[in-house]
Image (cartoon, helix red, strand yellow):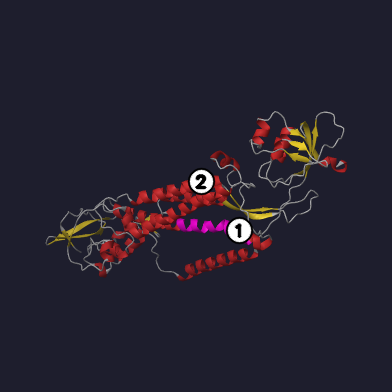
Amino acid sequence: MQQNISSYDRLTPEDCIRAYGVDYLSSRRHALVVVSGQNSDPLLGILDWMYVDTQNSWVCGTTQGANNTLETIPIDNFDCSIHVALYENEAFLMADKEVEYCLSQKVDDLCRLEFAVPIMIAVLACNFVKLFCMVVTIWKCREPTFVTLGDALSSFLDDPDRNTVGMCIATKKDFENGWPDGEPKRWTVKKHFTYEAVGLQRWIGSNTMCAVAVIALSFALKYAIHYTTTASDIKTLWDLGFGTVTSASLIRWNTPILGSPGLMKNVLLANSPQIILSMLYIVYNRMYTCMSFSKEWHDLAHRQRSLRVTSPRGTQRSTYFLSLPYRYLIPISLVSIATHWILSESLFLVAIDVFDEHGNFDTSQSILTCGFSCIALIFLIGIGWLVLIAGVGMGLRRYNGGMPLAGSCSAALSAACHPLADEHDPALGPVKWGVVNISQGVGHCALSGRYVSPPVTFRWYRG
């Protein structure tokens, strides 16, 4: 020790407790604790602390044992924590004597980069396939794209579909039950639920998938709290940290695997829930896109609007970023980012290399596993319930009446796009859906850039 005295820092008792009262010690090694009073033997004892216990019981005091050893006092009947040692105990005791200061040996933090070659190869292969598909799509696909509602309506207005002539008030449900016969139909006003545009099965399926994920997280939280080796009250769980590596919240494998196989196993375990979260994002993004799509469609029955298309012409408008209005896009993106990050803090890879008192790497004590954070899981479950409530609530809203429910049914959309023969290029300007003419008591409805009137309840329409 005298030869390495320059590597030792003098710490106050409080600083010594803070420095060594951690789960995993990385920047310090030995500590020489100097106590007050006169002693016949300058060495009262040695405490060989291996950090295998989840509580740092030594901070509450030690007693002298046999053969120059120090033993921790029993802590079963009282709270022994760093906070208690720092702010509630009268003094820091070692061998029943008050500590004056510590000499702490500083060491450099050691770290290394680990990666699993099979995972790296799989990621590179997937990215190559994705890049190849993008290049082929750009190179081969030269036809106009149907990305937005405006793209479809613009195409149908420019080239009306003869197969849907005479079906101007046909709905999505009419085409699902069989192709309409094109005969006149009576108009009835109905305010449809937004889930009807998505489809009842898809709406229920999307929200059921979210509910199952939240319930699974709740069971995971139950087991995580059960296996946390500390008290399970909310304050203790909060003190354990948000995505913090602690000895109290590690998965204890019966047969730990180190090296590349162990790394692969734990990386896949830590990241597999992200796949489910990505699937939920796709499902809900599709659902809200369809709701937004139908909202834009129903608005065309109440005011003239220019079509929102991929490649604007005339007074047409450009499409939204990611095809969603910002009132949908911003919350969905923020929730997606937050949940992916919180999930990464809920279950994460832990790799700890342990070195013995001489600085030699000790594989028998080293750890390669996954850690978990109960408080992060609680936040994730809370967000999950909010997403589920929002999904159900949004589906139970109603669109304004006055428009056939088309959803994403291209046949129902094309049926509403049969303007009068003398109207040229209506898609290039603002359009509105309504009655464009009446012949022999039967009206004809279509998207038009001219003046249109709303259809009248119980009147006959065809065209």
**Residue 412 visible to an observer of this rendering:** yes
Q: Is 244 on the left-hand or right-hand side of 48?
A: left
State the residue at coordinates (61%, 61%).
265
**Residue found 41% across the figure and 68% down from its top:** 143
What is the C-alpha distance between the residues marked 1 and 2?
Answer: 22 Å
Res. 378 mark: 2
Q: Secondary structure at mark 2?
A: helix
Assign the C terminus to one quadrant of the image.
bottom left
Residue type indicated by callout 2: Ile
Q: Nearer the viewer, residue 251 or 16?
A: 251
Q: Is residue 298 above or below residue 19?
A: below
**Magenta segment range?**
264-281
Residue 193 position within the rendered picture, expressed as x and y whole percent measured from the top left: 30, 53
Residue 426, numbered label? none
Whether the magenta-drawn stretch holds residue 275 is answered as yes
Q: Who comes first in sequence, dot 1 or dot 2?
A: 1
**Residue receiving disc 1:** 267
Q: Is residue 394 above or below residue 103?
A: below
Q: Is residue 132 found inside the magenta-colored segment of the image?
A: no
Residue lying furthest bottom in this view? 140
Q: Position of residue 302 (x, y in %)?
A: 26, 50
